[in-house]
Amino acid sequence: MAHRTPAGHFAYSFAAAMRTPADYLLPRTTGEARRLQIQSELLREATETLLGALELREPTSCIDIGCGTGDAMLMIARLAGQGARIVGLDLDTRPARARLEGEPRFELVQGDLFSATPLPSAPFDLTFSRYLLHHLPDPAAAIARMWELTREGGTLAILDIDQRATTTYPSWWPYDQLEQWIRDLYLKTGIDNHIGHKLPHLFEQAGIGKPDGTKVVGVIRTIAELSEFLPLLLDMIRGKLLEHAVASQAEIDRVDAELATAPQQTSIYCYRPAAVGVWKRKRYDVTAMGLDPLAARGR
Ligand SMILES: C[S@@+](CC[C@H](N)C(=O)[O-])C[C@H]1O[C@@H](n2cnc3c(N)ncnc32)[C@H](O)[C@@H]1O
């Protein structure tokens, strides 16, 4: 939780926000790793758009927080210099380890954002995080922590979900039902998957000020194109739906059976949840450097 220091800055006690693997809602299965891989494909354009907008000058140290399968680390590597170090931090690094094996410029650290310390290559030219924040109970504290890991002159960039507008046309009830269940389950378990549009305000709440920019990217696919993804999406929450009494076994079975017809739905279009990218560059603290703030403007 945040409090204000005598100088008027926000200070966070990260101890209260610490997480362990048991705090994470989603399962650790090969199916979930595959779902993350497909989701990563769906997020490719949004990720490229965000990374492109940052106008980074050959970052040499980067971190992807909550790196999952390590997919975004590969995208970051493409825009970083050859000698750059790219760190992936996650409560569970096994999926990324399998993917990035034998690549010396990638380094994986298993641990929690709030407690993993010291991190190799910190502070970072680029601190990046994709689809992690909505899983955390105090996202502003997470932003403050990520800012702390960013070096002066470096950039913090976050991409997260805004699920509110996802829909199908013509309407396809199994998809709409599945997304409604996700909404209900997340509400019950304190996960905010509408967080995307809140990110700019959360930057301010974290005490780091207004973001430098935002990018919103949506994707439309046919249900047929999502035919592998949708059953994995249901599998991701199947057990939790029952545990939290969001759906009965009979209701889940009915949706399951309908999802099996997804490959035939070639003219039903799905507007997936929007991905919201927000970023900010950390200005140099010119007074700490003993420089005249006016002369140093524009740094
Ligand atoms: C929805 S996945 C997103 C994975 C990846 N960023 C992507 O976009 O494909 C969220 C990831 O964050 C990790 N995670 C959750 N809480 C975390 C924490 N407190 N510290 C570090 N990683 C965390 C999970 O283990 C999971 O791999």
Image (spheres, rainbow, N blue to C red):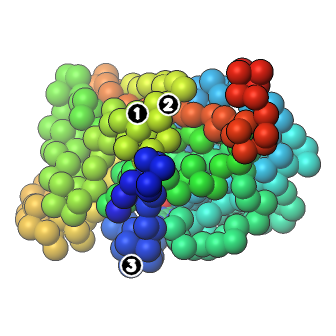
Q: Earlier in the sequence, mark 1 or mark 3?
A: 3
Q: Quadrant of the C terminus?
A: top right
For image coordinates 9% across by 67% down, the residue present is 245
Q: Secondary structure at mark 2?
A: loop
Name the residue that disc number 3 marks: 22
Other residues around mark 2 within 10 Å, as few (<14) / some (14–19) / many (≥20)? some
Q: Is residue 256 left or right of residue 203?
A: left
Residue position marked by numbered label 1 in the rendering: 200
In the picture, measured across the screen, residue 289 lies left or right of residue 17, that is right
Residue that badge 2 annotates: 211
Mark 1: amino acid: Pro
- SS at mark 3? helix
- Residue 248 percent coordinates (x, y): 8, 65
Q: Amino acid at mark 3?
A: Ala
Between 13 and 74, the one nearer to me in the picture: 13
* Name of the residue lying farthest toward the right: 83
